[in-house]
Amino acid sequence: MEYNAQNIETKWQKYWDENGSFEPVEDFSLEKKYILSMFPFPSGRLHMGHVRNYTISDAFARYYRQQKFNVLHPIGFDSFGMPAENAAIKNNADPKEWTYDNIDYMTKEFATLGLSFSKERNFATSDELYTKFEQGFIIDMYEKGLLYREKGFLNWCPHDQTVLANEQVIDGCCWRCDTPIVKKDMNQYYFKITQYADELLEDLKKLEGGWPKQVLTMQENWIGKSNGLEFDLYFDDESKAKLNDKFSKFDVFTTRPDTIYGVSYTALAPEHPIVAYMCENNLLDSHTIYQIDAMKNASSIDRQKEKSGVALGVNVIHPLTKKLVPVWVANFVLMDYGSGAVMAVPAHDDRDYDFAKKYDLPINAVIEPYDTDLTKGLEYLKDIDGNLYMAYTGVGKLINSAEFDGIDSNESKEKIIELFENNGIGKKTTNYKLKDWGVSRQRYWGAPIPFVHCESCGIVMEKKENLPVALPADIKITGEGNPLEKHPTWKHCSCPKCGQDAVRETDTMDTFVESSWYFLRYCASKTNWEKEAFSDEQIKYWMGVDHYIGGIEHAILHLLYARFFTKVFRDLGYLEFDEPFDKLLTQGMVLKDGAKMSKSKGNTVDPDELIAKYGADTARLFILFAAPPTQELEWNDSGVEGSYRFIKRFFDRSANSASVDAKPIIDHNSLTKDEKFARKKVYEALKRAEEVYTERYTFNTMIAGVMEAMNALNAQSNADVWTEGYWILTSIMEPVIPHTCWEISKEKFGLKNLEKQEIMQEVFVEDSITLGVSINGKARTEIEVAKDATKDEIISLAKEAGAKWIEAKEIVKEIYVPNKLVNIVIKG
RNA sequence: GCGGAUGUGGUGAAAUUGGUAGACACGCCAGACUUAGGAUCUGGUGCCGUAAGGUGUGAAGGUUCAAGUCCUUUCAUCCGCACCA
């Protein structure tokens, strides 16, 4: 019987399909595992990154099925989004057709890979049923005050013609098309994710151990919590008059209250309302206004190049010293963090320092470093003229700080905050970098926001019984403007509240909304699929996800949003837990010739071609064998060949196994050395497999273990040992190369071995042990000793074996590590 | 700049608590079978050396009977964030 990948694979794929082999059952008394891989965008074809992702989750799913768990291993498509629309523009096609054609094609690709997905629970997020439930949740969130509409300076991508969330702006450019973003003033809906900032941060602790450290750190940094002091700075009378008494103060936030006595100027963001007022009312000369405009209009990249600013000619009063402090506009002050205004302490902050140097502003030192080498305080930071040449940002002892002189700078923070609070001039505050999540997109191919604008009632929610608010089919996608806005009839409706003529919201939602709850939808079954998004019982049983597998690129966006939605759903009473994903496995990239596979580099490998040439099992084996899943995977064509050869050998040598319907019983003591060794290797492989699935996820070592066992089996000829070996090895390998293993298992064992295997401890018991012998820690030789040999016997044997190196030298120490080695320490 | 990770043969990588470094593969070399082989099988393969032996996990120190593994310093590469006050 020759190995023929195509025949075997199509045969079993058909069998699995016809038997519904991978459908979970709705019996909540069973032990469950929820294995999830991040669902794909239906871009057209699978790439190797997908194949890696789904091969990993499939291995988990198949393993746990063998262990008799009720396994949910679903797949679907994240099918809304701009690429569909862009493709439609390019090919003059319909985004819906394009999307669903791709889904059909990719679904076939999944099947040819032998992936054990549930079919019944498959869906695409662009399905109207999904939109219907999602819009229901959106209405609930609006009612809870978690969704609001506000005008703001937004990130606008001129290429995609839409706004983007902060998380979707990478280095000042659009995350999809790399076009530099510009700021645009427009209305937009926001999710109040900031309300959950602290919980999102705190609950990261619950994920420690289950999630990669790197992802936790990235989320922590993104949330960006910082504690400090917030206080008002008041204008002096002269400045107030200059401002037509429109403003008397502005507030600032600082994490360094310990440096408060070193404030020598303050700076406002160019977008700050006071600056805007001064520009609009000609309180500044035209050149100054021109400079401010230039700062505002600079791209975020240009703005970071060099610090620049301009004095406003007004002053505020220092809250403690009562001295006058000049107010500047500075391009490095960001309007959307804190209050868009800062106190500047050039002596102890790098940015403030650079700015002060450039504009020759005073630099007042108020912290003296503790460094013992520095007898002269800040002297080492000074040049010949006695001027500081860099800021000192470390800790130290306060100087020039009135009653706080001599106090440790860290300790003084609390004391100074207290002083502000006691005098009612400031308060302790926490700031976050995280901002509310803007979800409006001015595009067609997304879920409509189910709101109606009524002249008399304002924003009104669509009635739930009228959901979904579906997209119109008769649409022209031109790439210019919002197609929903331009549609002749779609937006016109009557107000759900008063019945008057009204207009629908034409913005659609960010597609990250759909992926924020899709894992909950999979919990629903046929019984209630149409009726509701999911039931309490179903969620309670299946969630949380036991293993979530996907790319690190979602470390912030998707994973943060999904965590947010989970907490919101909890507060809406839909579920009772805080975190959706118990264990997260982030797979590494697939590389070729040292670079990420990409069409532009021309270094891609097409999964379809690979499967056509070698079969899915070869692709799966290579992917799991070449590197541990979290590491980058370097593609290697001859490595693929090697995997193919192994499968062929594995298949051919199954001829050595008898056809049985139970594992043979073997009298271990009657076996030869080689036979015993082969059995040991087989059970070692089994042991390792258990560890791999539960702790280590290093499938490469599991497969290496099976290869070792194969090599050992091949070195002996006992038919029972072969049969037992295959009984176990096909079970271990089934999650990796399922088609081949089902074929062998069917032929030899009537599929009875594809289940949990018991480890026979007897094979690990040996009558003699091999020990290493080291002299002075250097491995020299080895000895074979009886398993019950005493320490003295062993050491004298070791000395005998190592006599050549010991010779006449003095033995200083003898170390015996049971089952490992003997180390003889000699002198001279 | 801040944060995280990774450095082991020609290559991908093993080494679970400090205990015989390089498992398992790829590649390469030799042999067998073959009309033929880019098939299959057998053996070899870190480096230097004919050998005995020496040497070896980015570099330099340290702890230890013993270090890829622990500690200190340092270099390189990759990733994430980046004027966040």
Image: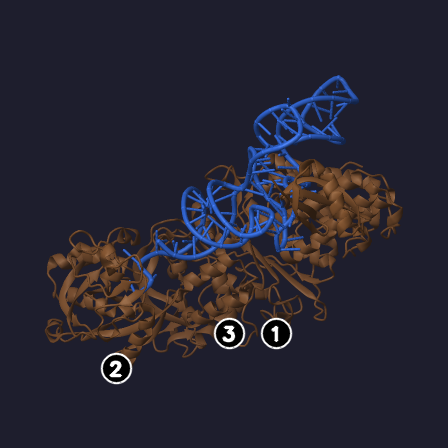
**Marked residue nearer the N-terminal end (2 or 3):** 2
Q: Which residue is mark 3?
A: A464
Q: Which residue is mark 2?
A: A423
Chain corresponding to brown in the figure: A
Task: Provide the secondary structure element on which disc 2 rests.
Answer: loop
* Quadrant housing residue A501: bottom left
Q: Same chain for the residues at labels 2 and 3, yes or no? A: yes
As drawn, A669 above or below A349: above
Q: Same chain for the residues at labels 1 and 2, yes or no? A: yes
The amino acid type found where label 2 is placed reads Asn
Measured in 3D between alpha carbons, the distance from the residue under mark 3 to the one under mark 1, in whole angstroms, is: 20 Å
As drawn, A453 above or below B47: below
Is residue A726 shown to the viewer in this render?
Answer: no
Q: Which of the two residues, A74 or A632, is positioned nearer the viewer here?
A: A632
The x and y percentages for residue A522 are 61, 64
Task: Provide the secondary structure element on which disc 1 rests.
Answer: helix
Write down the chain letter for disc 2. A
**Marked residue nearer the N-terminal end (3 or 1):** 3
**Marked residue nearer the N-terminal end (1 or 2):** 2
The x and y percentages for residue A112 are 66, 46
Q: Which residue is mark 1?
A: A536
CB contact under 8 Å: marks 1 and 2? no
Measured in 3D between alpha carbons, the distance from the residue under mark 1 to the one under mark 2, in whole angstroms, is: 52 Å
Write down the chain letter for disc 1. A
The x and y percentages for residue A63 are 70, 55
Residue drawn at (75%, 45%) of the image: A796
Measured in 3D between alpha carbons, the distance from the residue under mark 2 to the one under mark 3, in whole angstroms, is: 52 Å
Q: Quadrant of the N terminus of chain A?
A: top right
The amino acid type found where label 3 is placed reads Lys
Q: Quadrant of the C terminus of chain A?
A: top right
User: Within 10 angstroms of label 2, few (less than 14), some, or many (20 or more) residues?
Assistant: few
Chain corresponding to blue in the figure: B
